[in-house]
Image: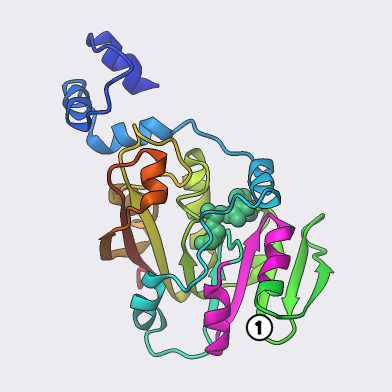
Amino acid sequence: MLFVRTCKQAGFRFPFKTNVGLFQAAASTCGLSNVSIMLAQQADRVMALGEWEERWQEDRIGFHQPHVHKMLENHIDKVLAGRTGVRFFFPLCGKAVDMKWLADMGHSVVGVEISEKAIKQFFEDNNMTYSEEPVPALPGAKVFKGSERNISLYQSDLYNFSSTIGGHFGAIWDRGSLVAINPRDREKYAALIISLMAKDCRYLLDTMLYNPELYEGPPFLVPDDQVNSLFGKSCDVELLESFDSLTDRQRGWGLDYLDERVHLITPKSI
Ligand SMILES: C[S@@+](CC[C@H](N)C(=O)[O-])C[C@H]1O[C@@H](n2cnc3c(N)ncnc32)[C@H](O)[C@@H]1O
């Protein structure tokens, strides 16, 4: 890592103590910004698809919340902006109950999730019946369609999904998605998300900030500066809310602070 190499050359010894101040002072001596330092900590962390599947098989899904996410509830009016029957996209959807909440309101939902177990559990947990079909354009993938609600969940690697398969979306709810993908894939992820946005799309993005020296992720930290660099060229980015979301679960990971930050991202008008 550039940071480690540069700091070693500058005479700093590793590993650093878990003191962010010292760490940042050292880095600033090396001429690196706080954002680069924080990102460098997790840049090489890779979680394979098989590891996610293992988590589902072993029920290690502490990320799943049994209730509608507070930030989606708080900002739903801004996302809808007066529209009805909006097409929502859920990247890396898991079995988020938010999908049913939106479908119950008359919106349609398309999700993408690698784990078939997660998708089946979504329908079963919510007492919904579903059909299952292959997706000719996506060899090996399936789409699961709810019979009672307009919810279609693709069992696929997200990076094989595209607007050719799913069309464009009027809204996107990104919770546990940008923060869950491998940090090295962020540019590819942002390009895909932008390609799925309709002109009037309103994309609600939930990110996290914490000290990456204390926990390797996922979830990974995504600083605001990176949200701006990923989406700011073609979209307007507005920070809607930031709140302290540290619980005993994250204290158990070793974290001493955790801020969750919610952004509204909309395509720039031409
Ligand atoms: C942190 S969980 C979040 C799930 C959901 N968004 C939520 O808020 O509960 C990330 C999910 O993404 C799935 N996943 C990870 N990488 C994926 C990929 N490349 N394509 C599709 N699904 C993926 C995992 O199986 C997991 O269910």
Q: Nearer the viewer, residue 265 or 150?
A: 150
Pinpoint residue 27: horizontal percent, then vertical percent: 22, 25
Which residue is identified by label 1? 150
Q: Nearer the viewer, residue 174 or 20?
A: 20
Residue 37 visible in rendering: yes
Task: Give percent across and percent down for residue 156.
Answer: 70, 56
Residue type indicated by callout 1:
Asn
Please say if 241 is above or below 30.
Answer: below
Instruction: Indicate the quadrant of ligand 1 in the picture.
Output: bottom right
Q: Quadrant of residue 233?
A: bottom left
Q: Colour scheme of this structure image?
A: rainbow
Residue depicted at 70% across the width and 74% down the height: 123
Q: Taking 82 as reference, is 99 above or below it? A: above
**Nearer-the-camera pick, 37 or 260:** 260
The question of residue 190 being in magenta is answered with no
Magenta segment includes 119: yes
In-image side of 22 versus 243 (left or right): left
User: Would you call the spot at circle 1 few (<14 residues within 10 Å), some (14-19), or many (20 or more)?
Assistant: some
Magenta region, residue range: 96-122
- 131 horizontally vs 176: left or right: right
Which quadrant holds residue 220?
Answer: top left
Is the C-beta of the residue carrying label 1 under 8 Å from the nearest atom of ligand 1?
A: no
118 vs 21: above or below: below
Task: Report the residue at 39% width, 90% height from top.
Answer: 82
**Residue at position x 35%, y 54% from top?**
247
**Which image quadrant is residue 143 in?**
bottom right
Is residue 158 in view from this perspective? no
Image side of residue 249 versus residue 121, left or right? left
How many numbered marks have been drawn onto this rendered protein structure?
1
Q: Secondary structure at mark 1?
A: loop
Q: Which quadrant is home to the N terminus? A: top left
